[in-house]
Amino acid sequence: MTSPVRLALLGCGTVGSDVVRLLHEQSADLAARIGAPLEIAGIAVRRLGRDRGDLPVDPGLFTTDALGLIKRDDVDVVVEVVGGIEPARGWLVEALRAGKSVVTANKALLAEDGATLHDAAAEGGADLYYEASVAGAIPLLRPLRESLHGDRINRVTGIVNGTTNFILSAMDATGAGFAEALEEATELGYAEADPTADVEGFDAAAKAAILASLAFHTRVSAADVHREGITEVTSADVASAKSMGCTIKLLCIAARGTDATGRETVSVRVHPAMIPLTHPLASVGDAFNAVFVEAEAAGQLMFYGRGAGGAPTASAVLGDVVAVARNRLAGVHAASESAYADLPVRPMGEALTRYHISLDVTDRPGVLAAVAGVFARHDVSIATVRQGPAGGGAAGRGDDADLVIVTHVAPDAALAATVGELRGLDIVRSVASVLRVEGGL
Ligand code: NDP
Ligand code: HSE
């Protein structure tokens, strides 16, 4: 057997400690698959004194000097499971420029400044692998960057945040409000003490940027992604969706399109949306993730599994470690970043979407015509209208009526302007709910 491939592990928290466990438990199999044993050269952490339970590793390997560890001559591969922008960016650039391959789960860094990492990898002739950064255990990035490279991907639609999927699933199942469902997610350990990155959609937006970059051979950063979280989703929205045979999911959507001049573009967005119960993503419950890919020749593909958690994420990290270790032994590198298409990213206002709008209106002659006139003025076509007494039931609330309108596809800016004008009409008492609709109704 050849000499070991030596790893610098940066971070030993939720993911890092499971990387250590799996490396220990599977050492013989991993060595056989790679053709050389894997050895941990050192583990960089923030707190040397932290209790790490019965982690099967020599305590003498821990250090707080991550950079010193990376620079050591006996380190071949750097595995980063710390997270955040700095100091992780500086560490990874240092490693890659020195020709040391990097495996990282750091979606925030890849989405903020993936270009710097890819450039450093090209400069140093090193591999940069990041399967764990999107949808945890689900093999997704390798299929996008390898298996589907002979095809043309038109659209990627995914549920890529487990915490928000758990919350929305709980709201749908029990009728709970957002705050109550978030509390449950926190108690069960899905949501972090500060759940902002999840519930405000930042985590999903970072993943959307990574997916769009790979799918469309274009550099897309988090700043290019339109982002809306789930904090405004109410139990009334969930009930409204149910009454239409739908459920609400936080979707990441990356799609090809063309602008007014016929130039090819991409749009990338994260927002809650109503999808029909017949849509493949509707049945993805609890904290699971799933990504639906539509490609020209392959057709529709669905990837499903656990998107978070120590062991599932460590599984993806180790898959990458095996790949870069094999490359190293063979003296080869994976293909570098593919960003040749360099497609412009369209602003959200130009993205083509559909709205489901629920209005509380005065119930008198001419109201429907006035409402329809607003849609017409913004060139938005109505697909369906349903009217009933306000508050539902046979009796309703006297002079009011509920009006539920679903539009055809239109530029998002036109739809938003329509809702804005509706809010200003005397006959509209309130706009009870506005949700985008995906997947046909
Ligand atoms: P944790 O917070 O559990 O662990 C972070 C680790 O990094 C800890 O070991 C911590 O040290 C160490 N660390 C923090 N700052 C420094 C520093 N300045 N120098 C050295 N070490 C430092 O994070 P997770 O394991 O949950 O996440 C790690 C990465 O994986 C992130 O990028 C995350 O986005 C990504 N990821 C996580 C998933 C999950 O389910 N948790 C799923 C998919 C991706 P110490 O132990 O001393 O505190
Ligand atoms: N907070 C993330 C989630 C972890 O809930 O999906 C996985 O990236």
Image (cartoon, rainbow, N blue to C red):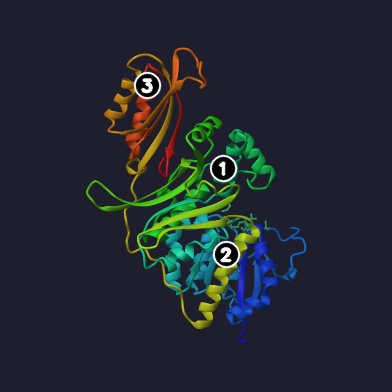
Q: Helix, strand or loop at disc 3?
A: helix
Q: Nearer the viewer, residue 187 or 12?
A: 187
Q: How crowded is mark 1: few (under 14 residues within 10 Å), some or many (20 or more)?
A: some
Q: Does the residue labelled 2 lie within 8 Å of ligand 1?
A: yes
Among the two numbered marks 3 and 2 on one chain, the one whose residue lies closer to the N terminus: 2
Q: Residue furthest left?
A: 261
Q: Is mark 3 within 8 Å of ligand 2?
A: no
Amino acid tagged 1: Thr
**Which residue in the structure is indicated by mark 3?**
424
**Which residue in the structure is indicated by mark 1?**
196
Give x and y (percent) for residue 103: 54, 67
**Which residue in the structure is indicated by mark 2?**
316
Image marks 2 and 1: residues in contact by CB distance under 8 Å? no
Q: Helix, strand or loop at disc 1?
A: helix
Q: Which of 409 and 259 is in front in this view?
A: 409
Amino acid tagged 2: Ala
